[in-house]
Amino acid sequence: MVDEGEVRRIAGLADIQIPEDEMPAFTVQFNRILDYFEVLDTLGEAGAGERALHTVMRDDEPRPSLAREAVLANAPADEDGFIKAPRVM
Amino acid sequence: MSGVVIGLEIHCQLDTRTKLFCPCSTDYRDDGPNTHVCPVCLGLPGTMPAVNRTAVEYALRVAKAFHCEVPVECEFSRKNYFYPDLPKGYQITQYDRPLALGGYIEIEGDGGLEKRVRLTRIHIEEDPGRLVHKGGGDRARYSLVDYNRSGVPLIEIVTDPDLSSPKEARRLIEHLRATLEYLDVYDPEKEGSLRVDANVSIAGHERVEIKNISSYRGVEKALTFEITRQRSLIRRGVAVERETRHFVEERGTTRASRTKVEEHDYRYFPEPDLPPLRVADRAAAIELPELPAARRERFRVQYGLSPNHARTLTGNPGLAEFFETVAGDDPVLAATWVADTLLGELNYRGRPVGSVGPARFSALLALLKSGRITDRSGVEVLRIVLDGDEHPDAVVERLGLAVTGDDTVSAAIAEVIAEFPQAVADYRAGRGNAINYLAGQVMKKTRGQADPRELGRRLADALAEDGPCT
Amino acid sequence: MEDPYHAYIRRLEPRSPGTGILAGRTVAIKDNISTAGVPTTCGSRILEGYVPPYDARAVELVRDAGGAINGKTNMDEFGMGTTTENSGFGPTLNPRDTTRVPGGSSGGSAAAVAAGLADLALGTDTGGSIRCPAAFCGIVGLKPTYGRVSRYGLVAYANSLETIGPMGRSVGDVSTLLRVIGQPDPRDTTMRGTPYAHDPVPDVAGRRVGVPDEFFGEGVDPRVAATVRAAIETLASLGAEVVPVSMPSMACALAAYYVTCTSEASSNLARYDGVRYGPAVETARPWHDAFTLVRSAHFGPEVRRRILLGTFALSSGYYGKYYGKAQTARANVSADYARLFREVDVLAGPTMPTVAFRLGELADPLSMYLADILTVPANLAGVPAISVPCGTVDGLPVGLQLTGRAFDDETVIDIAAAYEAEVAA
């Protein structure tokens, strides 16, 4: 059972906002889903090495990169060849 | 420094041709921003990583060189955190199943004895892009992102907290760097190719992490500053706070991170697009080249070098190879001239040893060995050869630096004895130092072309037979 | 041509590029499969304006085979839904009954094929997203073996579960489209097996068909169950040996699926930050505030819910309880299939527990999740599964699901073809 505070903490971790007026209903639904997941508690935890496949690696051969115009074409804002982003400091 | 406990996390870019998960070239340093990116390293929707075999091979070489245990399988995981230089919103790295575990690096400890610094692990990961802050550091209005670096392969080498001083930390990094060069997996000339985070504490107190040290010289500076800071806190009875600090290279100081000390929860899980990698078999097949420690030992035995010269000359593979090329039939002379003279001259000029022609340097050594020029002239010749395009023989010829014949020196000795009676008297009165003064005068007259080792003996002889004993 | 069911997010003028086994045939592409120069939205407002500079491998292969791509189809946002109501561009309607959903998340592709707007379609299947709408719209849809079709260019929702697959009006069409897309690609290093080069052999004589009890359990509409049992009788009449079997790992399969897919999604969807593409992030704000705003404004409610579920399941202190245990459950499902496929050639059961829902009927998220109970096991184990129409209930289509061994998509196709030939006759 998680309370609204815990949902807010998870939302903070995920950088997602749940509007306050939706929070009570959201929390109820969230808990119903988590309750359903409880069935997993009947199981032990898997060890490592359960994945059957192995990665096939590629050769270290360079291939052409995208033209810069193509890189910037989708970017909402750019400057001097850089892509603009919010400040991080 | 007793009571100091240091552990390092060292990130090195592997010198592969392409990025870790896509075929973009890693040779981006001379090009403009966002010119070495493709849908994969730009994190465009729908793209998938494909592992560069050479990056894995390089990392395994390092693991083997440092005696790590390589498991049958390793696995990539996602480290989830959100930052604009991280185009997928997660970094593909390794978490609970790294490429290598354990192992050690041997360095010279502060006591002068060999010291084993244990390794916790080595893993492979991708470099993020690069951020530029516009509007100046603290008051940045926005950031600019260049993804050229995004996806360049890194290895992260994590040591146990086995280091006891900033000097040991520096030596570890120097040795690591040399080994990576011997393994041919790393190019120290590439800017920002080595980055270090250090954990440091004073025994019995909290641990501080210093991030953002981007040179191996910086490691010693940052740690020295930080230890002084922590000691001063402890002296004043203030508790050392467990925190992350940033190294400010220009000032040689560390500062507290201004980002709030948030609980990091990276939510690691196995990268679903990359099934496990089989690595033990690959590691077993690797044949390592001769590494610095082995070459050092060989230089001592094979060439009869002093421990110091052997250490210096094996400091990087290019230097060691240069030495072996010019060692000839007098390796000790060659070692002296390479380690004590050439390196200093190159360092002064900011040039690598690769820029020196071994044939010319051998010619210089031949001049010195035959006694045709003095050591002093040798330095002069070397400088001219380094700065111009002249053969040492031609320089000696042009400047008339060949050691002068006996007559000239004899004449100069006679003149000096006549011109400096006081010094002569002092010498004869038992003040042996006076002979150095007289030798200096002879050198002056012969413009340094007298062999100094010879000169002392000949002056003493002349003073003994010449003139009256009082 | 009109699009009365809103099957498409974007129509394209089909070029007819000439020769190849798809020459002259129109192909609709689900909008989470990248198309060079053509917007690819995944049914999400957060990808508005994004134009991929590259083609997905499957799209490349469709073009090379002469297929005429006639549009990008509607879908639940990022594939997160069972109804195609969770699209940022409005719901798709079921051509068989416009008061009903077409199923999801490849509802646009299914509706386009069912309504004759396209001959064939590419869908994607993470937990039933091809088979569910195929069943609800009365067409054929195959989820191929994981690793048989390149995922390069498929916008990831849950990488370890999903695959691109063919949808069509007949098993033969589906097989033809799989021949086109079932080709190797060095850019998807999870690919395995041999290229698919099979022509359907409609023969089921001597094949062993397992029928798991659990596929007819609680929650399965008895009329749907009866329709599917009748279809299995048809297979028996054609010479198949029908064997009742049991698959106890089903008990945890749905929970394991939702924990796994939401965990992967929480990570996959972190790249939509409005920096490199998509609606602009506000660069005047501090990073985390700006990032939070973009995500909260442009992701729909179901996507936000799944990001939170996945973030929770992976977070410190909960990882072992959720993600870790889910992987155990997943291994158990694979082990059950491995055991069963030593005894039988395919498993048969209903694709969906019910017929198509009414629009708006599945408002509660958990009820919607529960509808996936019969389709998710194949994704957890990576095995191939097909849905073929096998009759109707109240005039609404019912799908027969046939599941086969990994990399034996051929047998699944053959048995489906045998059934289809018999009912057509």
Image (cartoon, coloured by chain):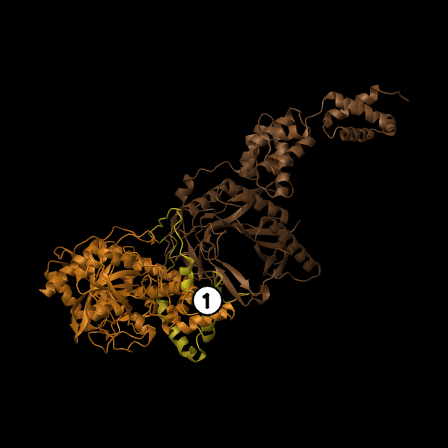
Chain colours: A yellow, B brown, C orange
State whether residue A63 is above or below residue C247: above
Which three-letter amino acid code belongs to the residue tagged 1? Ala
Q: Name the residue under label 1.
A: A77
Outermost residue toward the top in this view: B465
**C393 horizontally vs B110: left or right:** left
Q: Is disc 1 surrounded by few (<14), some (14 to 19) or many (20+) residues within 10 Å?
A: many
- Front residue of B44/C199: it is B44
**B124 horizontally vs B306: left or right:** left
Outermost residue toward the bottom in this view: A21
Residue B373 appears at what percent x and percent y? 67, 27
Instruction: For residue B33, say whether it is visible.
Output: yes
Residue B146 appears at what percent x and percent y? 48, 59
State whether residue C393 is above or below residue B105: below
Residue C111 appears at what percent x and percent y? 23, 70
- Front residue of A65/C285: it is A65
Quarter of the image for residue B235 reads bottom right
